[in-house]
Image (spheres, coloured by chain):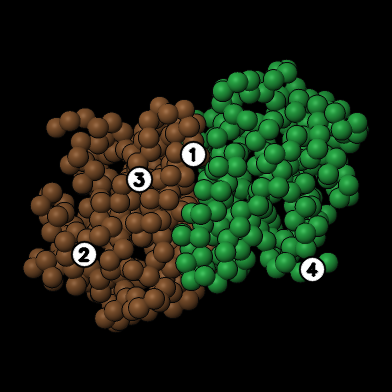
Chain colours: A brown, B green
Amino acid sequence: MAMMGDAVVLLSGGVDSTTTAALAVGRGFELCALTVDYGQRHAVELAAAERVAAALGVKRHVLQRIDLRVFGGSALTDSIEVPIDRDSIAAGDDIPVTYVPARNTIFLAHALAFAESIGGFDIFIGANAVDYSGYPDCRPAFVEKFEELANLATSAGVRGAGRFRIHAPLIEMTKAEIIAEGVRLGVDYGLTHSCYVPTNAGDACGRCDSCVLRRKGFAEAGLADPIRYA
Amino acid sequence: MAMMGDAVVLLSGGVDSTTTAALAVGRGFELCALTVDYGQRHAVELAAAERVAAALGVKRHVLQRIDLRVFGGSALTDSIEVPIDRDSIAAGDDIPVTYVPARNTIFLAHALAFAESIGGFDIFIGANAVDYSGYPDCRPAFVEKFEELANLATSAGVRGAGRFRIHAPLIEMTKAEIIAEGVRLGVDYGLTHSCYVPTNAGDACGRCDSCVLRRKGFAEAGLADPIRYA
């Protein structure tokens, strides 16, 4: 396998970021993982990110704590009710209430700082435009614009030592395609976590948007979901 | 004075961000100030930001703590020596050792989240391309690119409820021009803080790049600097 150098992967410990990390490893990158704790409700997610990072053999795993609750504005950081039992997550042009203002911009900005600090030029993000079409910062146009910005914003980019690349390999894939690809790469989805509102024991609720999407993905891929549901 | 609505200003409590905030007030904006503590060496700067915010009558002042030391790579966040007694800060194409990877990208990303959360579309940043020509993320091209990104990255931008504007009113001004403009607007520079390495009592060193630039600016503007030097 060709050595591609160091890359930064944004790793939440969910299905998408875990599959993205596995794809990056498959392409020959040495990974540094960045997990952002932005004041979301459950620490279970952070534990999942640690398990996944260890399983994928990342060389460095950084946890960045940022409290996005200081700004307000989302079900994941405020006390707005997380919707459950919805078949369709983002029908039409609706933006889900779980939208967090500028979240992926913040995540990628931190990933860019990390990448430049380690001398890397490749950043992987599990953004996906298919299932969550309502999130503006999960669309190809956003990712492409951030890549342009990265090359203007940094010493490494301006000096021309290399060109920053923002890789969003899942962006046009369905959840079923993502899971099938991950299984092909040997991902153990039993390590991952998706639920917005897990039980105290860490079991997934099975009914929030994130659980609904995940279960639908496994069902459509014809695979069993190895995690426990309450 | 026309009411321009709410704006977010990035406020460090230094000369540039304070002047920028005063300009925004002068243009009729109601200000929300965002101060980012990114693990820099001195809390004196944070106290200055609070004094300035109070003096300018900002309606909300948010302190966001982000530890950029987790990534490494700069004199301001690492233990690299801060240079002193230099006449020229960034001669030629050199990028100062005080460069922090992706700092303004991170700052603007957080400011964008804040702006969207409060329903504002205007973000003010005291970026300056003249004195610190070595910082890639202080150039007009960077600011313009971030503005494009902001309008792709957010629900408010994509919905067309308004258009995000990144204002960098100082970007082409010299330090002397900035200070003269601030004095015209009634800014009390005695409230501000610039030094990278202040004494324990909070006095400025007078010799680091930031102090040298500040003193040169006051001298060229023909004005007395009201702060205390060690």
Marks 1 and 2 belong to one chain? yes
Q: Which quadrant is the C terminus of chain A positioned in?
A: bottom left
Number of marks: 4
Work out how far the residue at label 3 is from the one at label 4, CA to CA, in angstroms: 42 Å
Q: Which mark is residue B95?
A: none
Residue appearing at x 26%, y 35% in the figure:
A30
- Mark 1 or mark 3: which is in front? 1
Work out how far the residue at label 4 is from the one at label 2, CA to CA, in angstroms: 49 Å
Look at label 4 and name its amino acid: Ala
Residue appearing at x 38%, y 70% in the figure:
A134
Pointer 1 residue: A152
Element type where label 2 sits in the image? loop
Work out how far the residue at label 1 is from the one at label 3, CA to CA, in angstroms: 14 Å
Chain where mark 1 sits? A
Look at label 2 and name its amino acid: Thr
Label 1 packing within 10 angstroms: few (<14), some (14-19), many (20+): many
Pointer 2 residue: A174
Residue appearing at x 29%, y 82% in the figure:
A85
Chain where mark 2 sits? A
In the image, A28 versus A38, the foreground residue is: A28
The answer to whether any part of residue B16 appears in the image is: yes
Pointer 4 residue: B2
Look at label 3 and name its amino acid: Ile
Q: Earlier in the sequence, mark 1 or mark 2?
A: 1
Pointer 3 residue: A166
Marks 3 and 2 belong to one chain? yes
Work out how far the residue at label 3 is from the one at label 2, CA to CA, in angstroms: 20 Å
Chain where mark 3 sits? A
Element type where label 3 sits in the image? strand
